[in-house]
Amino acid sequence: FASTLTPLAGAYVIGPTGNYSGFDTAATDLMLRGVSAPVTFEVQSGTYKEKFELQQIPGTNSKDTILFVSQSGIASDVILTDSSLSTSNYLVYLQGAKYITFKKITFDTDHNGSYSQQIYLTSTSKRINFINNVFNGKGGNQTSSYHGLISSYNSPIDSVLIKGNVFNNGSYGVYFTGTNSLDAKHIRVLNNT
């Protein structure tokens, strides 16, 4: 279906005084309207208690990309968290999403019980970047993949860059599995701690 709404283009602000109150409302608008140029979501300082999903967004390509970034440039100023992960184990679910970057954001699931996965990539997600973020997973001696911080299970994801991030706790910082026909390709994990 083709939307009759004007596609997003340019810079927008997420936060109490921004164009969008939270990540979820921005994600809903992205899915509904698509993009016609590069889009940047500058996120105001604060704690955002929510989770959201992104599928393939109309109009995204190697030129018309999407960036979620802390407005202050400091990851600890923007915290994405949610305490209800047992029904859907993620903060951000990327299902076939393409050309998206998350930069200088803190993802926090340290307080959650049985589930604390943060980023879940599925389907044909492609060209996804995580740069200079902080991932705070569940503390203690975690071994289950349900506590992996960036995860993908048997999905043909392609071209994921995980660079300059800080991983705290959780069972795995990055947990990707695949089969011969459903493998992850071109995954770069660089200079993380």
Image (cartoon, rainbow, N blue to C red):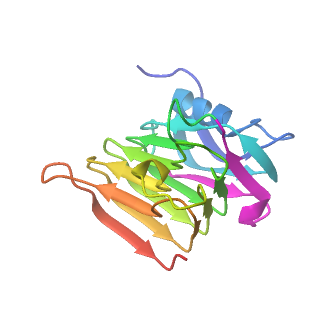
**Residue 151 image offset from top left, x and y in percent:** 41, 53
Q: Residue at x 79, y 59 (%)?
A: 77
- Residue 70 is situated, as x and y percent measured from the top left of the image, at 72, 58
Q: Looking at the image, how many numbered discs can be counted on the residues?
A: 0
Q: Furthest-bottom residue in view?
A: 191
Q: Is residue 59 magenta?
A: no
- Residue 12 vertical placement versus 105 (above, below): above
Image x and y of residue 165, in percent: 57, 70
Q: Quadrant of residue 56?
A: top left
Please identify the residue farthest to the left as the structure is shown: 180
Above or below — where is 140 with respect to 182? Answer: below
Q: Is residue 62 visible?
A: no
The residue lying toward the viewer, choosing from 172 and 63, is 172
* Residue occupying the point 52% across, 62% down: 141
Span highlighted in magenta in the image:
63-83
Residue 165 visible here: yes
Question: 146 or 140: nearer the eye?
Answer: 140
